[in-house]
Amino acid sequence: MARVTKNNFLSGTINNLVFRNLNGVQVVQSKASKVRQTQKTKASGNEFRACSTWAKLLRQNLSSFLLHQTDSYMYRRLTGELYNALLSNTNLNKGERTPTNCSTAGLNGFEFNSHSLFKDYFLVDVQAGLNVQRQVVFNIPEMNCKQDMLFPQRYNNAELLLYCIAFLPENNTTVAEAYTMIELSNTATVMPPFSWTSPVFPEGCWVIAVAKLMYYTSDKFINKNYLNSKAFNPATLLLSAHS
């Protein structure tokens, strides 16, 4: 049903026509036809919505690591990468795939803050893998902090946080976690190769390993003044696997 507005414009619908006022101009459009969803398109939609839920669970389990210091669209990017990871499993039908029956290795290398990419500030390769004992093993090759790191102006010190968790997405429960911290300085010369192994994680969990650089200055009143914020937080996902 259409009606005449006080400005003598038609507003509403007549049969298959839609009348409206667009910046003082009468506009007439035909009604959009309804899209009939097939079972496959419904399954795809359900799968994507499920990825959004799983990405939210992952963010919640990493909340103490992320500290809300991500870019505003991180959650959308993470959902998209998780969905792409599920799509790589062509052995299962749409709607049957979950993070627990698909490889989520496609998340490896995901950057949590697009304003400050971890790979732009830490130039050597940080390796994280899950061994047969269900332990996360971190390895960093020999490096020179002056050459292999980027330090913001007036910040000469940093901490590299290596953190891993194991959680159950079915009930959103973190069942184990572990971390280590490495002190870094742009006055240091050569740092020898570094390796660290986590405790054994329970079987049947979603295991995530992440890394973050935390730059700071020191004074005699406050031990450490950290630079990291929502606008600057080099952090990355190193490993997504199943124990």
Image: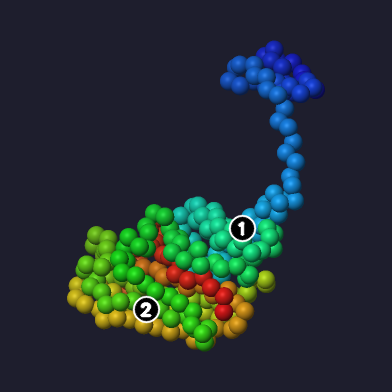
Where residue 12 sits: x, y (%)?
Answer: 74, 23
Where residue 50 sits: x, y (%)?
Answer: 66, 59
Label 1 amino acid?
Answer: Ser
Label 2 amino acid?
Answer: Asn
Which disc is residue 139 wearing? 2
Where residue 23 sits: x, y (%)?
Answer: 58, 20
| Image quarter (top left, top right, bottom left or bottom right) of the C terminus | bottom right
Name the residue rendered at 63%, 74% in the picture.
168
- Structural distance between the alpha carbons of marks 1 and 2: 31 Å
In the picture provided, is 119 more to the left or to the right than 71? left
In the picture provided, is 234 more to the left or to the right than 78? left
Name the residue rendered at 74%, 47% in the picture.
38
- Given residues 181 and 164, the one toward you in this image is 164
Q: Earlier in the sequence, mark 1 or mark 2?
A: 1
Q: Quadrant of residue 10?
A: top right
Which disc is residue 52 wearing? 1
